[in-house]
Image: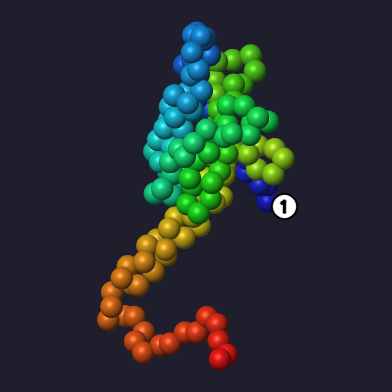
Amino acid sequence: EVEEPPPKAGLVIRCWTKAVVPPIDLDRPRMMRAMSTVTEKLSAEGSGAVLPDNLSLVERCCESSHPGCFVYRFGSRRIHVSARSLPSCDELLVVVRCGGGFVDFADFARRHGGAEQTWLRRRAAEAAASARPEQQQMGVLRLNSARTP
């Protein structure tokens, strides 16, 4: 009988804002720094996680039930990401809202990043091909509707 390897633990980073909390809102800078740290670690560790080229912060989530949540562009998706404090320590875990719960961002990236990057490359290749006139179909007439006199 072959034993399965234990599941990989989520990436945990030290929380640089948990010890001292000034009266200003630090959610956005904290989230941006947490994502930057996690993406650097994912790229450096050789974990097989592929991150889409367009991974970027879009906006703060406007749903009142998602405090501290930010919307990120991840390939063709818009994902809701939060940096959660781990209880009884000064570390953060970056999580993605998935269904009714949360998934570790590192696991999400390992699972979906390659497919999303492939989608981006395919879309870019299609855009480049459609821009070249020699590859366009000439003489094709498409009718959207027919009118009767």
On the rendered image, what quadrant is the C terminus found in? Answer: bottom right
Residue 138 is left or right of residue 1, and the answer is: left
> Can you tell which quarter of the image residue 62 is in?
top right
Considering only vertical position in the picture, is 86 above or below 79?
above
**How many numbered marks have been drawn onto this rendered protein structure?**
1
Residue located 43% across and 58% down the image: 120
Residue nearest the observer in this picture, 54 or 91: 54
Up-down relation of residue 135 to residue 52 (above or below): below
Residue situated in front as seen by the camera: 123 or 94: 123
For residue 93, what is the image quadrant?
Answer: top right
Q: Is residue 48 visible?
A: no
**Residue drawn 44% across the image and 44% down it:** 55
Q: Is residue 87 visible?
A: yes
Q: Position of residue 7 (x, y in %)?
A: 63, 40
Question: Between residues 1 and 75, which one lies in front from this camera angle?
Answer: 75
Residue 27 screen position, x and y as percent: 51, 23
Q: Which residue is mark 1?
A: 1
Report x, y in % for residue 89.
59, 15
Residue at image point 28% right, 78% down = 133
The residue sitting at 48% across, 45% down in the picture is 73
Farthest residue, direction front: 149
Q: Amino acid at mark 1?
A: Glu
Q: Is residue 47 above or below residue 66?
A: below
**Left or right: residue 84 compared with residue 27:** right
Q: Residues within 10 Å of mark 1 (few under 14, many from 20)?
A: few
Q: Secondary structure at mark 1?
A: loop
Would residue 31 appear left or right of 6 to someone viewing this image? left
> Height in image: 20 above or below 27?
above
